[in-house]
Amino acid sequence: MRRSLVTARLRTLGRTVTGPVAAGVLSFFCLSGPPVASRVAWAQPAPRAPVVRREGDYTGVSPGQPPSPEGKPRRALRKGTLSWIGFQPKDGGAEVFLQSPTKFELEQRMEGSTLVVHLAGLTGQVHNTRRAIDTRFFDNPLARITSRLVRRSGKRPRGVELRIVFKNPKDARQGTLRTATEADGLFYAYLTFPEGAEPAAETDRSGAASSPDAPDVPDGN
């Protein structure tokens, strides 16, 4: 079988080799075996172990970092746009930061146990900022953050409105405000919230608040 294959290969070169030359060529192919490349086991890189994180683990974010010179060029942001809503738990508390290429005014007010944050001077939102941020599973007092564009109404100018819901109504309060133009050239507003109290007591089907740590009360019999 190997002899016939070698003869066919030689004929494809446009000539027929016979005699001692053919015998020598056949001996070379028969004794040498398959090509060396097919017998070499190339070293394969070891597969990377997957990174396993527990539920609730969060490595955090770093707002205001300048773009890396090796990274892709950043897409230009339209003026008056809310480009990022960020959240980061901190020592039981929380920090919410808002990014825009344009400076804006920030006003806070309470509506019951919900904090309403109005960003005056902004007229648009990047698509991702329209999504709700669920923060219930982190060690912090906040439960949910939503945003939407609002029209001018009375004394309230047009802008973006955030609504921040707290896990426990007792923790509902305005955040400590700080603003800055960071190294990336963008404007940021930071709202910081302190560590929250204990979660609100659960309510059973009858509507009464249940407290698992309440002591047993004797019935008097």
Image: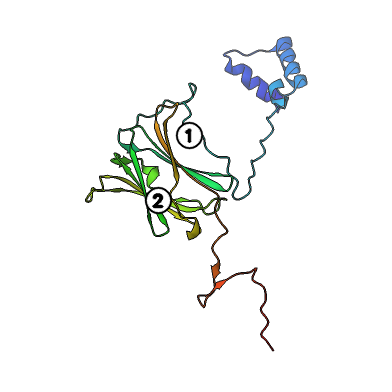
Residue 80 falls in which quadrant of the image?
top left
**Disc with the residue nearer the chain's start (1 vs 2):** 1
Q: Amino acid at mark 1?
A: Pro
For the residue pair 107 and 82, the one nearer the viewer reads as 107
- Above or below residue 14? Residue 207 is below
For the residue pair 183 and 172, the one nearer the viewer reads as 172
Q: Amino acid at mark 2?
A: Thr
Could you tell me which residue is drawn at 35 percent across and 29 percent down?
76
Could you tell me which residue is drawn at 71 percent across and 10 percent down?
21
User: The residue tagged with tag 1: helix, strand or loop?
Assistant: loop
Could you tell me which residue is drawn at 51 percent across and 34 percent down?
62
Residue pointed to by mark 1: 63
**Residue 152: percent from the left, percent from the top?**
23, 48
- Mark 2 surroundings within 10 Å by alpha-carbon count, few (fewer than 14), some (14 through 19), many (20 or more): some
What is the spatial separation of the Cα atoms under label 1 and label 2, in whole angstroms? 19 Å
- Above or below residue 78? Residue 161 is below
Residue pointed to by mark 2: 146
**Residue 75: percent from the left, percent from the top?**
37, 29
For the residue pair 206 and 17, the one nearer the viewer reads as 206
Instruction: Judge from the rendering whether residue 152 lies leftward or rightward of residue 177; answer left or right.
Output: left
Instruction: Judge from the rendering whether residue 102 lies leftward or rightward of residue 132; answer left or right.
Output: left
Q: How many marks?
A: 2
Instruction: Judge from the rendering whether residue 150 lies leftward or rightward of residue 213; answer left or right.
Output: left
- Mark 1 surroundings within 10 Å by alpha-carbon count, few (fewer than 14), some (14 through 19), many (20 or more): some
Residue 165 falls in which quadrant of the image?
bottom left
Which residue reaches farthest right?
A: 31
Colour treatment of the image: rainbow
- Above or below residue 200? Residue 124 is above
Residue 16 falls in which quadrant of the image?
top right
**Residue 118: percent from the left, percent from the top?**
34, 46
**Residue 22: percent from the left, percent from the top?**
70, 13
Quarter of the picture containing the N terminus is: top right
